[in-house]
Image (tube, coloured by chain):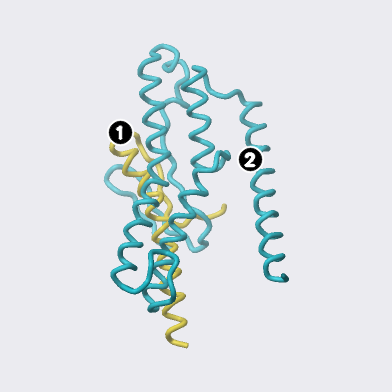
């Protein structure tokens, strides 16, 4: 049970990291060109 | 959950509902169409910049997937990259995360409007034709994208259920 929990915690954290890495790519490229980034959400609100 | 604004004015937010993520970019081209017509060369440069910014997300995901593949290879020396037997808990999680990163990159490159691929298509159109897609054209492209995404989802569900039942 503990192993399963650890697995799902690892997986959830990993998925959030993947989304974060994606947005980080956009952010760093934008900053490289001096384009202003107004907001960056690693996990966004549907509203 | 967490929110702060950094020294460059970017507002960082970690929200409780994990649906997507986004970077709102202050696009000079959209704000000043008059400037775009005044200086075609700088407009082309801005379009190139926009394309690189859009492509950077999937590129980072590809790089991350490759890094994770090497990491899981180290963690589980007997397994092959991504298509392996279950070696250990960490290696399996790492492989799944790598696959998700790869899938996210490929999905985002689909030429459909809310995705990076769709925005890249619109940018390419603007660079080739010399003007942005009209409002009606954008609306039709959005409709096409929504129908395509729904079709893809439906096809995926039918394939999955037929595989499960068969």
Nearest the eye: A36 or B115: B115
Q: Same chain, marks 1 and 2?
A: no
Q: Looking at the image, which residue is at 37% across and 54% down?
A: A21
Residue B83 location, quadrant: bottom left
Under circle 1, the secondary element is loop
- Counting from the top left corner in percent of width and height, residue B159 is at 68, 60
| Residues tagged 1 and 2 counted as in contact (Cβ below 8 A) | no
Q: Position of residue B113 (x, y in %)?
A: 57, 38
- Residue receiving disc 1: A33
Other-residue count near label 2 (Cα within 10 Å), few / some / many at <14 / 14–19 / ≥20: some
Q: Secondary structure at mark 2?
A: helix
Q: Residues within 10 Å of mark 1 (few under 14, many from 20)?
A: few
B15 or B101: which is nearer to us?
B101
Q: Is residue B17 above or below residue A5?
A: above
Residue that label 2 marks: B145
Return the x and y of residue B124 as percentages of the image width and height.
Answer: 48, 27
Residue at image coords 49%, 49%: B106
On screen, residue B141 versus residue B120, left or right, reads right
Depicted B15 relative to depicted B117: above or below: below
Determine the chain carrying the residue at label 1: A
Hue used for the chain lettered A? yellow
How far is mark 1 from mark 2, CA to CA? 29 Å
Quarter location, residue B166: bottom right
- Kindly indicate which chain is depicted in cyan in the rendered structure: B
Residue appearing at x 70%, y 54% in the figure: B154
């Amino acid at each position: 049970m503990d192993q399963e929990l650890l697995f799902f915690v690892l997986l959830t954290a990993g998925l959030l990291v993947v989304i974060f890495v994606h947005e980080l790519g956009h952010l760093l490229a934008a900053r490289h060109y001096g384009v202003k980034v107004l907001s960056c959400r690693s996990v966004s609100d549907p509203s | 959950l967490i929110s702060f604004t950094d020294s460059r004015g970017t507002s960082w937010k970690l929200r409780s509902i994990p649906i997507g993520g986004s970077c709102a970019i202050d696009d000079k081209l959209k704000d000043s169409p008059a400037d775009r017509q005044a200086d075609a060369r700088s407009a082309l440069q801005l379009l190139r910049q926009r394309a690189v910014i859009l492509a950077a997300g999937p590129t980072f995901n590809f790089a991350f997937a490759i890094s994770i593949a090497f990491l899981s290879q180290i963690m589980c020396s007997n397994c092959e990259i991504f298509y392996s037997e279950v070696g250990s808990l960490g290696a399996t999680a790492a492989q799944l995360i790598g696959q998700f990163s790869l899938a996210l990159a490929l999905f985002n490159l689909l030429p459909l409007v809310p995705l990076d691929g769709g925005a890249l298509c619109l940018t390419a159109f603007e660079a080739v034709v010399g003007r942005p897609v009209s409002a009606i054209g954008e609306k039709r492209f959005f409709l096409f994208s929504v129908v395509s995404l729904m079709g893809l989802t439906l096809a995926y569900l039918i394939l999955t259920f037929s595989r499960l039942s068969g």
